[in-house]
Image (spheres, rainbow, N blue to C red):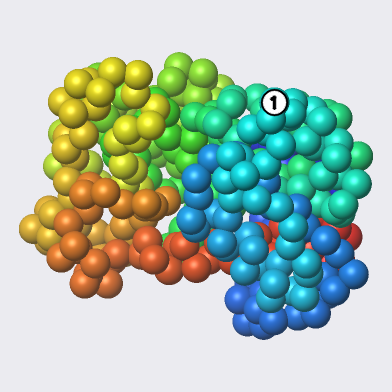
Amino acid sequence: MKNKSLISINDYSKEDQLKILEVAEEFEKKPVQNILQDHVIASLFFEPSTRTRLSFESAANRLGGKIVGFSEASNTSVKKGESLRDSILTVANYSDLIIMRNPLEGSARFASEISPVPIINAGDGSNQHPTQTLLDLYSIKKTQNKLENLHVAFIGDLKYGRTVHSLVIALCNFNTTFHLVSPQELKLPSSVKMFIKEKNLEYNQYVDIEDVTEKADVLYMTRIQKERFSDPLEYERIKDFYVLRKNMIENTKENLTIMHPLPRVNEIEIEVDKSPKAYYFQQALNGVYVRQALISLILGLK
């Protein structure tokens, strides 16, 4: 993995992914390690972010690294018309590794092809979000004590949800049974379902969330993403399509884990937070350990 960009979860083999989870466990036990003191990490967020940006910065800071970059493109030369190509080539002069979020699908792949330093994709439009996938795998492994042979239900925006796309692809390596719950307008794209078919795995599609709550080992909730809709009326019509309420998890499996990549709007009732099955805030914390592992492996420090 040394000096290897991570743009799609497919860029790293199953063995690579498991190695990252293994190193993340080490960082969870000892999160403060001064191994990045001679390195500069660039954090380029052309699109809003809270957890991804802050967990990457927290990861680098806990390892003694320096952070440069921006959290809003309007404060940069992009506002003056600078191209992505020129931005990347310039920032690569100042850093050893670039973490980038950009609303344009394919932007991270383009950046990796021209950059002399590795690129980590922190989300490119509705395409992929591979580091979220790695922390999701870590969270599933911690709560289920395994990754193989699980029933995982994805609920909500499966069309535009880049976290869903990446995680489905990754879970195809672990003999997962998929339960896909969405409105007709927000079904999982055919291109992602092809990965499931190619692995000869089972997937079922539903409209009603209560059809899957008792079957699942993992419930992966997602928000309906307003920013992905060109028609505001269409968003208003389906924004409250799914809300997970406390009574809906009463007869679920003992081992059920409720996950959410966050931010939450109203798709999980606040009362559910009190359940021991609710894991989304710990899931967000796990992002620090996984991103510490990823940064250190790409830079050849582990």
What kind of element bears circle 1? loop
Q: Is residue 146 visible?
A: no
Q: Where is residue 132 drawn, in percent x and y? A: 54, 49
Q: Where is residue 164 drawn, in percent x and y? A: 45, 38
Question: Which residue is denoted by mark 1 in the rendering?
Answer: 81
Res. 91 image quadrant: top right
Name the residue at 13% across, 54% down.
245
Res. 143 image quadrant: bottom left
Name the residue at 13% across, 60% down.
246
Q: Where is residue 154 drawn, in percent x and y? A: 34, 40
Name the residue at 59% across, 25% down.
105
Q: Quadrant of the C terminus?
A: bottom right
Q: Is residue 42 visible?
A: yes
Horizontal side of 224 relative to 98 (left or right) equals: left
Q: Residues within 10 Å of mark 1 (few under 14, many from 20)?
A: few
Please determine whether, in this image, residue 85 is positioned above or below residue 74: above
- How many discs mark residues in the rendered view? 1
Name the residue nearer the viewer: 302 or 81. 81
Query: Farthest left residue?
Result: 247
Name the residue at 31% across, 28% down.
204
Name the residue nearer the viewer: 68 or 53. 68
Horizontal side of 296 relative to 256 (left or right) equals: right
Q: Where is residue 62 drawn, in percent x and y? A: 69, 76
Identify which amino acid the numbered label 1 is placed on: Gly
Name the residue nearer the viewer: 195 or 241. 241
Horizontal side of 175 relative to 258 (left or right) equals: right
Name the residue nearer the viewer: 286 or 140. 286
Res. 122 image quadrant: top right
